[in-house]
Structure formats: structure tokens, C-alpha cells
Amino acid sequence: MSTAPVLVPNPLREGLHEERIPEPATMVIFGASGDLTKRKLVPALYSLARDRLLPARFAVVGYARKPIPEDAFRDDMRKGCDEFARRRPVDAELWGTFANHVFYQEGSYDDPAAYAALKTRLEEIEKALGLPGNRVFYLSIPPSSFATVVRHLGASGLTSPADGRFARVIIEKPFGTDLATAQSLNRDIHQTLTEKQIYRIDHYLGKETVQNLLVFRFANGIFEPVWNNRFVDHVQITGAETVGVEGRGGYFEQAGILRDMVQNHLFQVVSLASMEPPISMDPDAVRDEKLKVLKALRTIPPAEMDAHVVRAQYAAGSMAGKKVPGYREETGVSRTSQTETYVAMKFFIDSWRWAGVPFYLRSAKRMPKRVTEIAIHFKEAPHLLFGKRGEGIRPNVLSIRIQPDEGITLNFGSKLPGPAMEVAPVSMEFRYGSSFGVEPPEAYERLILDCLLGDNTLFTRADEVEASWTWISRIHQHWAEQAASGNVQLATYAAGSWGPEPADRLLSADHRAWRRP
Amino acid sequence: MVAAGPAGAQPTVAERFTRGEPIDVELDHIERAFADLWKAASAAGDGAVSRAALWNIVVPTRAQDHERARKMVDELAPLLPARVLVLVEEPEAAHGADADRDEGVRATIESNVVARSSGARVVYSEEITLRGRRGDARFGALVRALQVPGLPTATLWSDATMPEGLLRRQILPETDRLVLDTGLCTRPRQLLEVQRCPELASHDGLPVTDLGWLRLANFRLQFAGLFDAPVGGGPLLAARRVTIRHRASDEPSALLLAAWLASTLGWLFAAAEPAAAGVVGPRFRFDRPALSGGARAAASPGGPVEIALFLSEGECGTSGIGALELETDDPAVRFTVTRTERNHATLTSPIAPPRIVTFDSRRDAELFVTALGPAGRDPLFARCLALAARLATFTATT
């Protein structure tokens, strides 16, 4: 077939703008032999195809060092979809055609010849399947290989597409282990890629409730006027997991909960919950406002660090009626480990809106229940009219549950039925599961789709990453100094409890207490 | 107050109510009956009952179509918490010719119950059925009185042959979104009646959408996707013939699909040839204007293009469409979307091997929920319906 030298725009796309269908493309997954590809990425792509959200012309190319026959790779991906895809059971007919567009390419991450071979393979696949050369490279590889892979992708011309085509790179967390490594990584990849080509993924941002923070705050007129230090007493953020290290002791020993949860996921939640209204929903407008929050985090002086940040490690305890070992007894964990599995902190955002409002954040493993939430605690009414009968009055709390059972709850006082003016706390609940009959997409589905559509609103920008590391690295530095001087302040808590006593003191010193989420 | 009798009998009524059975109520006690029954249900059941509603939904229907409407409303409950007002127009015979024997409007209420998998929450939505004489002027006042305040109201006007006065004078003033269903049209000329509805709604600036239009979304999306890069819109500008294969009773859907193509591609209707005997359907000739300047001009020679409708014996899904094919002067250049079994379709184009994709056969309730979202504001629809109605005038009259 002859093609025009200049591509004629597709007029049938007019009027289909409400459908978020990306252009035909190829996704290359680096680290395709790893768990994430099988458990999350390919199941997410399959579910997107099942929901008709992928273009009909689409290919997936797995790339890894391990030699795997292409058919075996496809079979393994099918097993992953059977077990983990949101849309199950797998549609055999759809899988048949989907699998025909799944390929595997063996190659090293640091060999130029491997990238040349990959380029040739991609061109062959794209020619055979009528794909235009749009490419997304998903780096699901050890962080130490990020810069190397990006450099080789650039050197082989894979990140410089033809006119009108796109080449984007999704980078999994962790993005650096401290400020210096994050800055170094940003410098390295910016030598090859523009910031618009880089999609630093944080799957928390793909969760419906996190996105709903923006809608809840900025699409409703009644909340924003009270979303400030005139009405808010304090804010509590909880990121609690019931699991321990689940066989990832080696990784967690190097990371700790502060790196694993707080620097990325929970700080993203904090910034969305506390940022100023963006001038538009343009990606950079939103990210500019998030960045301002991270830059406004008040620096904690080293001398006050222990009074503001509590770290702890779980000891043996019980979860769901079963005994579980302490952290130091887990596989891959040093018996003298000083890695924190619990962190609680009090911090301030030095802005006009939040001046004087303490934020209390805690994140931990082996908590009694799995829950991530942000709770806005409002100030008490300025004058309490009801005397002893009003003892049931509690300050209003607006809690936004991010997982599980996503929703929003508002607690307020109500008159008890009866002749007396007695007050009792009641709650008004909104639950996604009840109000909307549809099942929300998996976070990876949403984020992969956004990347294919070129929308990086829900991805973290370089300066955001560096701003959060700037603040977090001071804590790590303080802990490193304590370790060097043999003065480690590390509490313990029983697995299945809500954390150590020093964390309770963090709030009780301010005449407050942690919520029981 | 619940019409079932004294207070002592209420638990039984409450049980019937939570099972979803219709309960007779007096017209002026509907809200109180709901409150009493929910209270009783809460006391008798496993804790507090949620009364959730995101929309008021008005469903006018004729008595003979009531069962279909009921089924849709029942299917809607787990998808969209709502207060649903079903207005059943009964034939004159049911009320007698004598106005003095008018039984007035009669009401029943019922619940739709959904148990969530977590077991923690149960969502109930409320359904009120009002039965009255054809065109009963009391319907409008009852709709106004029974809407949950502060919620938007959508009207499903699926039978365009119902009295226009009911829509114009009683329902449209209370409506925020009008939902039609061209999929229920079995004869092309019924599109002319449907077309009146967007015209009426346009006076109030109401968004209008169509379940039939949404049923065609699979074909529109997948066909459009065939012309994404690297193909581009060139073959569309060089098109000579389009074939639409449809189920015998779904010629109106085929006309709507034809109108979408012609409207979007700027083809100007020129002439029609009515259906020939057998399976050959009508053919419509369009003039394709030559373009000037740019890449489009090079690919667009102008000239005639034909859209031909054929009956299909194959799988046509809920849209009624079996296949959409486009040919250019070059016989090797052919693009097709063909519906296959079990909600799949095969896509073919000259540049890639055939590919199977999933199609849906969404139930009316699912489509209705979609219609209340952004897809319910598709500005293309009214334009395409107008053209489809014009094409319908050239089809057979029966």
C-alpha cells in the first residue's frame, strides 16, 4: 500500500475525545523476567485491552538478561493474568490475539550490541504489526541500572523517535536512596531524556482516592474555605501495613520504612492534601503546587530530631491470632539490625495556609490492620454551649481512606433523640464501593494508560523527588550520626500493636492522640 | 403512611419491602411510607440501612412496556444508587371513558437491594411507580414533588411515540439530562419521531444522549482506530464505498452509523436508492468535497462515495450491526470491523494481520449509567441523528 509522505490526521477521532484511547504503540519492559511484570504490568495491560482502553494495534516486548523462549514467556504472562488480572477469567480469544503481540528479547543492560539488536527487533515487530514507532520503555529493574539503561537507549537512538512519534520512559521506585543519589540519577537521565519523556511512577498516585483528593478539595465549594489553619487543628496521616518484610528482608534492610513508604507514597499524599489550588489541571500546574508544599516543609534542627521523629522495630507478636516473629528474626535481616520498620513524625508546613498546624505522620509494618488514610482534625467549636450534656462532643474529623475500603467519613456531633439536649458523635460516610457500582481500575492500569496518553500529572517530577529527599535525607543523616556515635534511638513495638510508646508521646505532649483508624 | 394496614402489620410489609416487592401506598404518603419502611428495615435487619441516591431518574413508559422498564430499573440498582420514578401510562380502557370514574394516579413503592461483597454495606435504592391515564397532567406535579432535592434528574424517554406533551410540558422542565434509545426503533422512519426530542430539549439547553448511540461506540472506536498512525486519514479521504451490515430490525442503527461517518468526514448527501428485493438494502450517495491545501488535499481527490446497507444473518450484538467495511479505489486497500461471536470483533487493515478485540454487549442499565457520564454530552449525536433521520426518509415506508 502506498502511504502519503505526510501523515494525514485521522478525522474519525473527532468526537471520540471523551474516550481515552492512546495511539498505537509498543511497550518495552526492562526486567521482564521479574515479578512485577508477571504480577502487575502484563495483567494491567491485559485488563486495559479487555476494557477496550488499549489501541487494537499494540505490542509488548519483554526484555531481560535471562534467556527465556518466547513461548515460555507468553505462557508465564498468561499465568500471571490468570492469577492477578483485574479482569478475570482471562478471555481465551482475546488472549490469543494479545499473546501474538507479546514478544521477548534477551539482552544485557550494558551492552551496546544488545540495544542495537533490540532496535532491530522493534522495527521488525512494528513493521509486521503496522505500528507507528511510538514506544514506552518501562524500567522494572534494579535502581543501579536505571542510568545505564537510559544512556544506552539514548545512544542507540531509541529515545529519539521520528517526527510525530513518542518515546517515553517509566521509571519504577526507588528513585535514589537519598538526595545525592537522586540528584545524580536525575542528572544522568536528563543527559538523554527531556523531563517530559520521564514518568517516575508512584503507584499510590494511581489510586482512585488519591486522585479524588483533588476532586474533593477543588470541585466542592464547601471544603476549601475551612482547609487551613483557621479551622484545622492538626492532620494525621497513617500508612499501616499488616505484613512484615515478606521474604524481602535483604531489600528492606537497606531501605527502611522511611525510604520505602514515606519519602514517596505518603509525601505524595501529604502534598496533594495540603497544596494550593493549581491554576489548571495541566500536569505542571499540579506538580508546581505539590512542589511548593515539599519545599515548605520546615527543617527539623538536629537537636530536635528525636523529639519530632520516632523510629522503631517490630518485635515478636501476633497477627490475626497467629504468632509472628520479630523483625530481627526475619530471613535476610541482621540480628543486630537498626533498620526502622516504624516511623512516626511531627512536622510543619511553613505556608500561609498551614502556619502552626502540626502534621503527624506514621507508617509501619506489622500493624493491627492495613490502612492508609489522611485525617483532618478540625478545631473545637469556639464556645461550648451544652455543658456536661455536651461531653459527647468531639472535634470534627474528616478522614479520607485511601486503602482499603476507599472513602470519606465526616464525624460530627448530633443531638441524641430524647427530651434532653445531649450530644453524641455520629459519622457520615461515603464509600466508593457503595456509591459507584463500578470496580475501579488497578493503579498500574491507570498510570500506564496515562503514560501512553502522554499525561504525566500523576507521575513525580525531578524537582519533587529532590525536594522530598532533601527533607528525608536530613533524618537519615541524623540517624547515621547516631549510629556512628553508638547512640541509636530505636524503640520496639509488638507486632500487631499500633506502635511504640514514644510515638504516643509525640502527640500526648501536644494533648492529642493518634486515631484508631 | 403505608397502605398495608395497622402498625402491627408493618414488620411484614417491611420484609416485603426489603425483598423488593411493590407496596401500595397513598399518593400523599409516599415519603412517609419510605421513612417508616426504612426504619423498620433497619430495626429488623443487620444494622443501619443506607439510603443512597446520586440521581433522580424518571422513566415514562406505556403499560405494555412496563416489564422491560422494570427490568432495566432492577439492573440499574447495583450500578447507580438512585430514586427512580416510573410513570406508567395506562390505556384509556383501564380507567373507563367516564371522567368521573377516573381512579386517579396510583402509586407503589419498592426497594432495590444490593449486598456488597464485603458484607459491610448494603445499598438500597428506591423505586416509585405511578400509574395513570395516558397523558395524565398529574404526572408532572408528582415528579416535582417526589424528586430527591439537590440531585440531578435524568429522564429515560425510550419510546419516542409517547405523547410529546408529557415530555415537553411535564417532564422536560424537571429534567437535567434526557436519555433516548434509538435502539428500540425497528423502522427507519421512527428516527423522525426521535429527532423531535433533541429539538425540544435544545430549547432548554439540555444534554441529550442515546443508548443506541452508545451501543455503536464499539464500532465507532475500533473503526476510527484503524486510521491511527501510521495509516492516517488518507484512506478515509479516498474512500469510494462503505458497507454496513445489520440485523433486519436494526436499520435505524445502521443509518445512525452511516450518518456518523458522513458527518465526521464532511460528505454531503446527494441521492438515495431504496432497497432492492432480497438482502440488498438502501444505498446512499454522497459527494465528497475536494480539499485544498495541506496533506489532506493530496489524499482527497473528491468525487462520489456510496454507503450501502445490507442485511446480516451473522452476529450483530446489542447494536444490531454486524460489520462496517470501507473500500477505496485500490481494491487492496480495505478496512473492516466485523462482529464475531461471544462479544468479539475482528479488525482487518492492509498494514497489519487481523486482530481480535473485545466488544461489549452492555445491558441497558450499564449504558444508562454511561449516558449520565461525560459520554452523555456528545455533541456529535444530535448532528448524526438529524442526518440519519434525513436518510430515513429515503428508505421504505414500512
Image: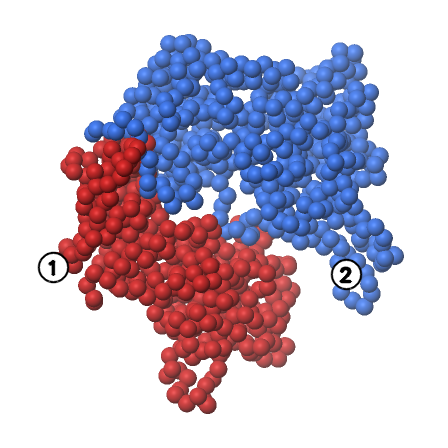
Mark 2 — on which chain does it sit? A
Q: Position of residue B381 (x, y in %)?
A: 37, 53
Q: Establish whether labels 1 and 2 are both on one chain.
A: no
Residue density around tag 2, few if under 14, some if 14–19, many if 20 or more, within 10 Å = some
Is A413 placed above or below A62 here? Answer: below
Q: Could you tell me which residue is drawn at 65 percent across and 64 percent down? A: B43
For disc 1, the marked residue is: B277
Q: Helix, strand or loop at disc 2?
A: strand
Disc 1, SS: loop
Which chain hosts label 1? B
Q: x%, y% of residue A238?
A: 68, 36
Determine whether A261 is above or below B32 in the image.
above
- The spot of residue A335 in percent (x, y) is 68, 17
* Label ID, residue A415: 2
Number of labelled discs?
Answer: 2
> What residue is at 57 percent from the left and 28 percent from the top?
A460
Q: Between residues A146 and A7, which one lies in front from this camera angle?
A: A7
Q: Amino acid under label 1? A: Ala
Q: What residue type is disc 2 on?
A: Lys
Q: How many angstroms separate mark 1 from mark 2 (CA)?
A: 76 Å
Q: Which chain is red?
A: B
